[in-house]
Amino acid sequence: MPRSADRGRGREDSRAPSALVVIPGTVNYFYNTNGRRLAEALGAMGYRVEVAPAREATGGARDLCLLTNIAEIVHALGGPAEAVGKVRALVAGAKAAAAVSLDSVMTNWFRWTVDLCAVSNVPTIFDLGLWDQRPLLEAPPAVRYRFVRDGLTPTETATMEAALGEAGRPRPIPWAFVGHVTAERAAFVDELVRAVDPGGFVYLPPLEPIAESGTPHLDPRQFHAVLARSRYHVWCSHHGHFYMEPERFRLPLLAGCVPLKVLTGGQEAPADAPLRELLVPLGELPARVRSSDREASYRRLCGAYRRHPLAAGLGAALDELGLPGASATARAVGGGGRGGLAA
Amino acid sequence: MTTRDGVSIVIPNWNHEVFLPRSVTSGLRGVEAMARAGVPAEVVVVDDCSRDGSAKLLRQLEALYHGRGLRVVARAANRGLAAARNLGLDESSYRYVVFMDADNEVVADNLPIFRESLRKTGAAAAYGNLLVRGMNDAAAHGVLSNQSFQRGIFRGNYVDAFAMFDRVQVVDAGRYDASCSAHEDYELWLHLAAAGRRVLFVPVAFGYYYENAGSMINREQADQNAGVHRRVKRIFDQVGARSGLPLETDCLRYHPDLGYL
């Protein structure tokens, strides 16, 4: 669980731009994780950053306020009736504010995010992901949509490089699939067991909140341990729309495991989707998992993430909001080393 | 009682003639998978005085496949599922026992993972995901036994009997209670847990669970046994205090390549 507000991630210079990152603090841990990731990226860009669980966050004059994720923040605050006023107060003092989304724009969950932003005076949604979903937006949403290419923080980059250095470690588990159970996923696992390899790791509990501790679900450390012994992390969406779940690419990457997004139900990857070799039609999955290309595939994935650090994607979006962004990023990453801004 | 390392796959059968080829075949594949792992195994079918063609079919199967590890034990009178499983315990040649209904299938290649889990942890039982298929479906539409053993199980069962057991511990605990008809497996889970035994959830696929009209997954049939269910609850959680008591097996997840999760 998050502790109290985490101050001073960025430089202490009082002239540095200031940012508040609000996280739910409860419910599903990955929103807390992503809030902290964004805070680290902002800190690397020279921001003075405060990370605060929704119940502890306070308004005030700041350059930036990020809400990760507004729907869960509203839930953590007791529901819309109680939360909208507080969210308005949090963003009122900020020069710029955005709600961070990690979902398909075709889902009710995203529509709920749009609605909450509209009533809470949050003008922008940052879609933190791997593929710009504008082609799927049927009409301009009530608030501004801005795609933010997800990447790694400096800490995560170091973790990835360490994992790359252990490329030869034993990985006895052929594949791992983790998610809440649905009928479609049951059929998918059946196919994995029958046609790919029966020995995969299968964790499909009923749908329940996934807190950081105290629940029967896998916590982040346990999930990492699974991925660190697995050759592939495979999954399919629990809805019928094309989407590249950024967490499902990033987490195996950090554990030396190759992510494979399986396209089911006749889905096709858009021509401009990145990481295409990791988007696999169901029928091609058995051959792919048995191929000897795994380590080369992992190296290519690492290269792709090196080219797109999180600070670069976030910085470009902040530039558009009139805040220090890409230029600050260039200073932060020093134009060399692991980072760089190559698109 | 033998404590010889190995796996006995026990299939109680009562009037499931049409399903026996499928379950016995998967069991024999399990014997082969265990042999590849260097571990002896067998399939023991306990026929509970079936009235359909099971007895004749089983005699033929035993004649054909005895050399591959199939044995058939035929009861002279019908005694019910719990008694059939208990007889299977007595007839088993090995320490680790899989109970599989005659209409189900085991994922043969994963049996060594479950035996290894029991051997390494000393747990009384290990269960894994059961992929639920309709009787005529080629793909699953649900998953049973898909989460760890938690206190909530005292409010209702979500772990099927289709699992691997340490025969020594089950016998020591008193076996299946034949007086809890239709809930004997639930009663055994609660009994093992209440007695401080460990029960593991191993997150791999353990088998295929086929729904059919006589399956206990059928709500109507389950409701008919509500009285027995109330009795089981009265035995193990009569004052509702179970959620506050220690539970040795709470949330135990284990995989031989990962340890406890």
Image: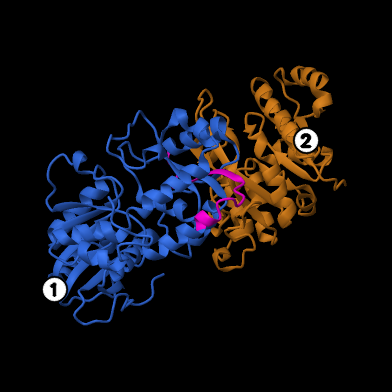
Chain colours: A blue, B orange
Report the number of numbered marks: 2
Callout 2 environment at 10 Å: few (<14), some (14 to 19), or many (20+)?
some
Q: Circle 1 — which element?
A: loop
Does A94 appear above or below B111? below
> Can residue B74 be seen in the rendering of this structure?
no
**Host chain of mark 1:** A
- Find disc 2 in the rendering and name its residue: B35
| Residue type highlighted by circle 1 | Gly
Does B114 appear above or below A88? above
Q: Nearer the viewer, residue B11 or A52?
A: A52
Q: Nearer the viewer, residue B256 or A116?
A: B256
| Residue type highlighted by circle 2 | Ala
User: Are callouts 1 and 2 both on one chain?
Assistant: no
Percent position of residue A28, x then y: 38, 59
Percent position of residue B81, x then y: 70, 37
Residue at the (52%, 22%) spot, across then down:
B136
Residue A122 falls in which quadrant of the image? bottom left
Residue B207 falls in which quadrant of the image? top right
Q: Is residue A99 left or right of residue A201?
A: left
**Host chain of mark 2:** B
Q: Is residue A16 magenta?
A: no
Numbered badge on residue A93? 1
Where does the magenta region start and end? A163-182
Residue at the (83%, 19%) spot, across then down:
B63
Percent position of residue B30, x then y: 71, 33
Percent position of residue A299, x then y: 46, 47
